[in-house]
Amino acid sequence: MARRIIIDTDPGQDDALAMLLAFGASDQLDLLGITCVAGNVPLELTTRNALLICELAGRTDVPVFAGCDRPMVRDLVTAEDVHGKTGLDGPDWDAPTMELQTRHAVDWLVDTLLTADDGEITLCPVGPLTNVAMALVREPAIAPKIAEIVLMGGGYFKGGNITPAAEFNSYVDPHAADVVYRSGIPIVAMPLDVTHEALMPKAWIASIGALGTDVGSKTEAMLSFYERYDLEHYGDAGGPLHDPATIAYLLSPELYSGKHVYVAIETQSELTMGMTVVDWWGAKRNEPNCMWMTEVDAEGFFALIYEALAKLPA
């Protein structure tokens, strides 16, 4: 039986790859819907981009919902310097013809989870956690319905990528991250510590373009644009591909290893705002609230994505 999931996202080229990976594994994952949040770019663009990726994959049957257009407390910070002015720079895109659902993403999340059995649905947030936190604040009764939250966010051993202390998703809405980490729901985190262990080989990007499909050519164009920032910023041999790690873990958890730890989110200090404070050695004796991943089989990760993209329509 396919695992029932919801992707919460702010596309973003790497968010787009997370969506495409889920679409290419429809035999294993039952994607109930996609909820969008402001993050990499403003909400008007993240919703547009989610619709474009659904159309690209031939999955206009998956409903897309617009959610929160700003963080819970702080002003919105975006990342056009990384993702381009549209969030999906690289390919040439036509305007989407698929329409957004009329309901607010938080309303849909609450109602969908309330009608589910306990532990039935897995949430996969790959952007700021605003929608998920707002749903939990509005209706705490949804928490038992969530099997686990598999998220991309945070960093500890690798530091941050928007400030020295904070990863982008956690920094954009630290108060939402705090709500989620204190929810008691099982969490699997894909932080910078693990995503930077899988850097995109140029030959792999080229091989996706060589699939000869619209999915392949547009993905190659997205990734070629996207990695230019990381190549300039970090000076590594290739750029990391963050968000698909969440879906890859659901499909092949054996690719990853980490440690159950206690994680807290900094919400007070401007110097370290959004820092994911990981108690790696159990110094505070708190009960672990997160599986914090640190190692990945990079070759297996990229092979998994390639195989999924190859299944998608021309």
Image (cartoon, rainbow, N blue to C red):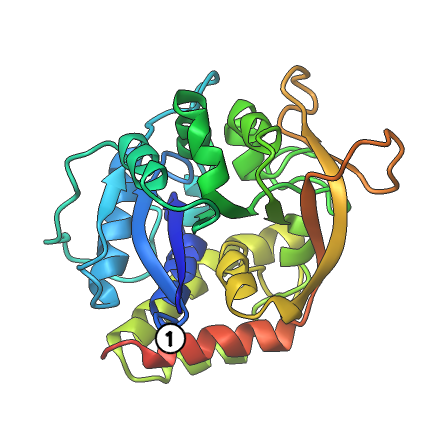
Left or right of residue 66: residue 79: right
Q: What secondary structure is marked by label 1?
A: helix
Residue 46 seen in the current view: yes
The residue that disc 1 covers is 309
Q: Is residue 76 above or below residue 248?
A: above
Q: Position of residue 4 (x, y in %)?
A: 39, 57
At horizontal 71% and vertical 35% (from top left) the residue drawn is 263
Q: Position of residue 272 (x, y in %)?
A: 69, 25
At horizontal 45% and vertical 44% (from top left) the residue drawn is 118
The amino acid sitting under disc 1 is Leu
Q: Quadrant of the C terminus?
A: bottom left
Q: Position of residue 202 (x, y in %)?
A: 53, 75
Left or right of residue 246: residue 86: left
Q: Is residue 313 above or below residue 187?
A: below
At horizontal 27% and vertical 80% (from top left) the residue drawn is 213
Relative to the observer, which residue lies in front, 5 or 116? 116
Relative to the observer, which residue lies in front, 121 or 70? 121
Quadrant of res 53: bottom left
